[in-house]
Amino acid sequence: MDNVSRPWPALWSLVIGFFMILVDTTIVSVANPAIMRGLETDINSVIWATSAYLLAYAVPLLITGRLGDRFGPKNLYLTGLVLFTAASAWCGFANDIQMLILARVFQGAGASMMTPQTMAVITRIFPPDRRGAAMGLWGAVAGLAALTGPILGGLLVDSLGWEWIFFVNIPVGLLGFLMAWRFVPALPTHSHTFDLAGVLLSAAGMFLLVFGIQQGETYHWGSIAGPITVWSLIIAGILVLAAFVLWQSRNRKEPLLPLKIFRDRNFSLANGGITTVGFAVTCMSLPLIFFFQSVRGLAPTESALMLAPTAIISAVLAPLVGRTIDKVNPKFFATAGLVLMAGGLGWYALLMTPTTAVGLLLLPAAVLGLANACVWGPMSTTATRNLRPADAGAGSGVYNTTRQIGAVLGSASIAALMQARLAEELPRGATVSGAQAEAGAAVLPDFLHAGFSTAMAQSLLLPAAVALAGAVVTLFFARPQSVTDWGKPVSETPGPAVVEPAEPPHRPR
């Protein structure tokens, strides 16, 4: 462990920026109708403002995680924060949709530089037996941000205008920069060679895969341009990433992604588990928001506030869970949390009818808050417990990449499923246009309420099933190893302990 006398102020400084960039992945969805009117554009162009951000955010995560190991997580975090904050101002002042999309690309690039560093710093400044509380806070922020975005977006758009969903980042970014500059330590760096081939292969593969999945629904899972189809991009992305893995296994110098970190069973399983969490959390809000607005007639802000119990309970309980998992096997919390998540979504599916009392719909939201509190911290603690200091950035990059891929898969899957179930459940000849559904501006006619409610309820069964699959993954978590020093796991079986030699740090002059 790097010797840091005051790790908690450093952590609080980092989570301010981390919360801000994760909120920006969801906050724009509520503002889409206002942006359409303000910039006089169409729904497809507005969706690209979100797609561009997510692409620029997700694609470089493997690379930026490793760059943090090489140049220092504090340096990379501060650089990314400056870029993100400046791009936020650019977004707010954008006077056409093309400028907004370009500014969102720079926002995403800044976010990709910041995210892996938050988790890497936690891994390096907190010892494994005290990391649970820190990861609990980190996880609470991750879960809370996904749920807070629509609420905050609705309040800002209704009161100040769509530009303020971006302008609000400026004071937050300045505060986050000053606190990180003051409290985040300049940790020792580790000498790494620059794996150019690995960088190119990982970036190309991630772009093809994420773009194909994210834009599949836009192009109806068919042709994009000439012979280029959505599925050809997805398959090409998988093949390029396979080539990337092959190259990493044969790189005799130093690979971008040290595959040896996957020898740790819990790290590998936690990456699978967090993929299901990213999938389910991204999926669940879309059918709910559409149901609240199009069937129950709630305003955008009111519909977002229906998810407030989830956010509040998660924020309150996640730190408590984090402190507990330093003493109790985190596997129990992760499994219980994912089962509760599936149960809460299933309960929602049963209650989503045109006549259910609105108050009853707050109960499954509370269950989902408990589920979120039990999932994020235990999962991240399990993933990072045995990582060496030299691999903290790479491990964080992998973990956040798999989480983001899960989110992209969830977003694409739920959109396709909702469309399919609407086609099946609505009366013959009745349709709900994509623009109407996206804007959520009008309550549907009464004769469509039953079919629309059934379609949205059935769609929620997808994230419920994925959450259950994640619970099965967590059942195979190994019991956490005891440790005598950071990153040096000691075998619990009789006999001499085998300690992996630590890589000597390289301090910049």
Image (cartoon, rainbow, N blue to C red):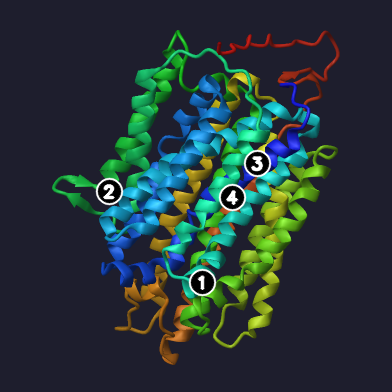
Q: Nearer the viewer, mark 1 or mark 3?
A: 3
- Residue count near mark 3 (Cα–Cα under 10 Å), binned few <14, some 14–19, many ≥20: many
Residue corresponding to mark 4: 19
Inter-mark Cα distance, 1 to 3: 32 Å
Residue corresponding to mark 1: 289
Q: Amino acid at mark 4?
A: Phe
Q: Amino acid at mark 2?
A: Val
Judge by depth and name the residue closer to the eye, 374 or 341. Answer: 374
Point out residue 470 in the picture as x, y percentages from the top left corner. 61, 47
Location of residue 47 with respect to 424 vertically, above or below: above
Q: Amino acid at mark 3?
A: Ser
Judge by depth and name the residue closer to the eye, 500 or 19. Answer: 19
Q: Nearer the viewer, mark 1 or mark 4?
A: 4
Q: Which mark is residue 13?
A: 3
**Precedes in sequence: disc 4 or disc 3:** 3
Point out residue 144 in the picture as x, y percentages from the top left corner. 63, 56
Q: Which mark is residue 230?
A: 2
Location of residue 231 with respect to 76 vertically, above or below: below
Do the residues bearing badges 2 and 1 touch, measured as CB atoms within 8 Å?
no
Point out residue 275 in the picture as x, y percentages from the top left corner. 54, 44
State the SS at label 4: helix
State the SS at label 3: helix
State the SS at label 2: helix
- Residue count near mark 1 (Cα–Cα under 10 Å), binned few <14, some 14–19, many ≥20: many
**Precedes in sequence: disc 1 or disc 3:** 3
